Image: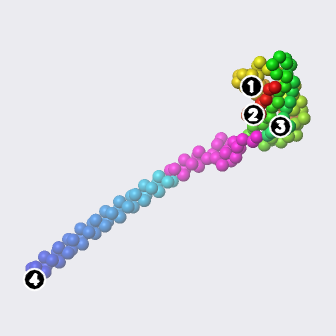
Amino acid sequence: MAKEEKDENEEKEGSGGSMKLIVIILVVLLLIVIGVGVALFMMMGDDDKAAESGDGATTEEVVEAKTPIYVPLHPAFLVNFEDQSSASHLQVDVQIMTYDEGVQTALKTHTPKIRNDLLLLFGSQKYEELNTMKGKRELSKKSIEVVEKALKEVGEPFKIEAFLFTSFVMQ
């Protein structure tokens, strides 16, 4: 009889010990789940703040607005150099980069004026100046100024990001 009581007490203590272990495991799992939930909530909160810009646009809208738009000016420009000592002709294909669809529309609408102003600029160049990388970069900068000025004069959006030479031949 004493032995039976001892076995029952051991079973109670054993089941009590395993109950304590189960409770501890459940508490630990609950804490982990709560911690993960809080971490996810905080990360999502940061994303919402980061996704909004000063004007209330979301990141998705900003990315769309920052997609470059390339506008080719066809056909290629072909001009004579002022000074024909080494080469007599310049032929260039160009594309204009902007982020503004309004600028894209304006470039297409006012292509004749823009081409005219660029032809005058290209025709006034000297071979010696354009034969260097620095000279080509300067021509690109001047070209941006010419295009922006032409668009301003007609009251159109004018923000040009880059003036790209896609072909540059001097003969």
Kind of residue sitting beneath label 4: Met
What is the spatial separation of the Cα atoms under label 1 and label 3, in whole angstroms?
A: 18 Å
* Residue 47 location (% of width, % of height): 57, 48
Decide: marks 4, 3 in contact (CB < 8 A)? no
Instruction: From the image, tell me which residue sits under label 3.
Output: 73
What is the spatial separation of the Cα atoms under label 4 and label 1, in whole angstroms?
A: 107 Å
Please state the extent of the stretch shown in magenta in the rendering: 42-70
Crowding at label 4, few (<14), some or many (≥20) Cα neighbours within 10 Å? Answer: few
**Res 136 label:** 1
Instruction: From the image, tell me which residue sits under label 2.
Output: 164
User: Which element is circle 1 on?
Assistant: helix
- Near-viewer residue (34 or 126): 126
Q: Does residue 57 appear anywhere in the picture?
A: no
Instruction: From this view, report whether residue 116 is shown above or below residue 59.
Output: above
> Which quadrant, please, contains the C terminus?
top right
What is the spatial separation of the Cα atoms under label 2 and label 1, in whole angstroms?
A: 10 Å
User: Which element is circle 4 on?
Assistant: loop
The earlier-in-sequence mark between 3 and 2 is 3
Tell how many labels: 4
What is the spatial separation of the Cα atoms under label 4 and label 2, in whole angstroms?
A: 100 Å
Q: Residue at x 83, y 42 (%)?
A: 105
Instruction: From the image, tell me which residue sits under label 4.
Output: 1
- Near-viewer residue (38 or 132): 132
Instruction: From this view, report whether residue 82 is shown above or below residue 97.
Output: above
User: Which element is circle 2 on?
Assistant: strand
Instruction: From this view, report whether residue 23 is shown above or below residue 124.
Output: below
What is the spatial separation of the Cα atoms under label 3 and label 2, in whole angstroms?
A: 11 Å
Kind of residue sitting beneath label 2: Leu
Is 44 part of what is drawn in magenta? yes
